[in-house]
């Protein structure tokens, strides 16, 4: 019998799963916005609708950043807004520390806690989060495996 994941591990594994949809080979990032232990939105880094993906067309680099993609955090915030979900007071589970721009967007949207397991190059996120009173929790990277033991579940066929 496997250990039941705590909430942080559960939501971070969802962020890791979202990152598998990413289309930029420079970074696969996933973000899950959570409020009152409920997922309100998810995001991953990928191209805008209708544009080519980095995986297909190559990265479009400006100042060492790929500008072809919309970052996971932005996509999650946009998804929440399009669905009418308030983000104020939410937690963001993100596979990597956000870039400077995404950190400012998360702060402005009202995110109060950020959970990460990996860093990101050339970001001022930590400084901005500290100024805004956003809590940063760094957790170990959860295991990559999903433990689903179908053959041992008595109600499964």
Image (cartoon, rainbow, N blue to C red):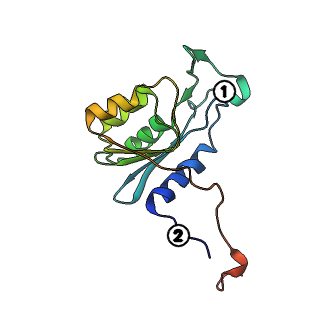
Question: In the rendered image, which quarter is residue 19 located in?
Answer: top right
Q: Secondary structure at mark 2?
A: loop
- Give x and y (percent) for residue 78: 43, 38
Query: Which residue, given by chain and number where applicable, does mark 2 sit on?
Result: 4
Question: In the rendered image, which quarter is residue 21 located in?
Answer: top right
Label 2 vs 1, first from the N-terminus: 2
- Give x and y (percent) for residue 157: 72, 81
Residue 124 lies, with reference to residue 107, above or below; the image says: above
Query: Which residue, given by chain and number where applicable, does mark 1 sit on?
Result: 52
- Give x and y (percent) for residue 75: 48, 37
Quadrant containing the N terminus in the rendered view: bottom right
Q: Who's the residue at 47% across and 36% down the image? A: 97
Q: Residues within 10 Å of mark 1 (few under 14, many from 20)?
A: some
Residue 16 lies, with reference to residue 9, above or below; the image says: above
Q: Residues within 10 Å of mark 2 (few under 14, many from 20)?
A: few
Q: Who's the residue at 66% across and 81% down the image? A: 153
Q: Who's the residue at 51% across and 42% down the image? A: 43
* Spatial separation of the CA atoms under disc 2 and disc 1: 40 Å
């Amino acid at each position: 019998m496997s250990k039941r994941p705590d909430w942080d591990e559960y939501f971070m594994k969802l962020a890791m799963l979202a990152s598998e949809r990413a289309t930029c080979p420079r970074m696969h990032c996933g973000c899950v916005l959570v409020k009152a232990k409920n997922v309100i939105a998810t995001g991953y880094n990928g191209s805008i609708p209708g544009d080519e993906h980095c995986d297909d067309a190559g990265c479009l680099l400006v100042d060492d950043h790929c500008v072809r993609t919309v970052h996971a955090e932005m996509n999650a915030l946009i998804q929440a807004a399009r669905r009418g979900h308030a983000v104020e007071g939410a937690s963001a589970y993100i596979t990597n520390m956000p870039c400077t721009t995404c950190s400012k967007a998360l702060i402005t949207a009202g995110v109060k806690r950020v959970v990460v397991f990996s860093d990101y190059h050339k970001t001022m996120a930590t400084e901005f989060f500290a100024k805004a009173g956003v809590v940063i929790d760094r957790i170990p990277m959860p295991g990559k495996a999903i433990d689903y033991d179908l053959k041992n579940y008595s109600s499964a066929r």
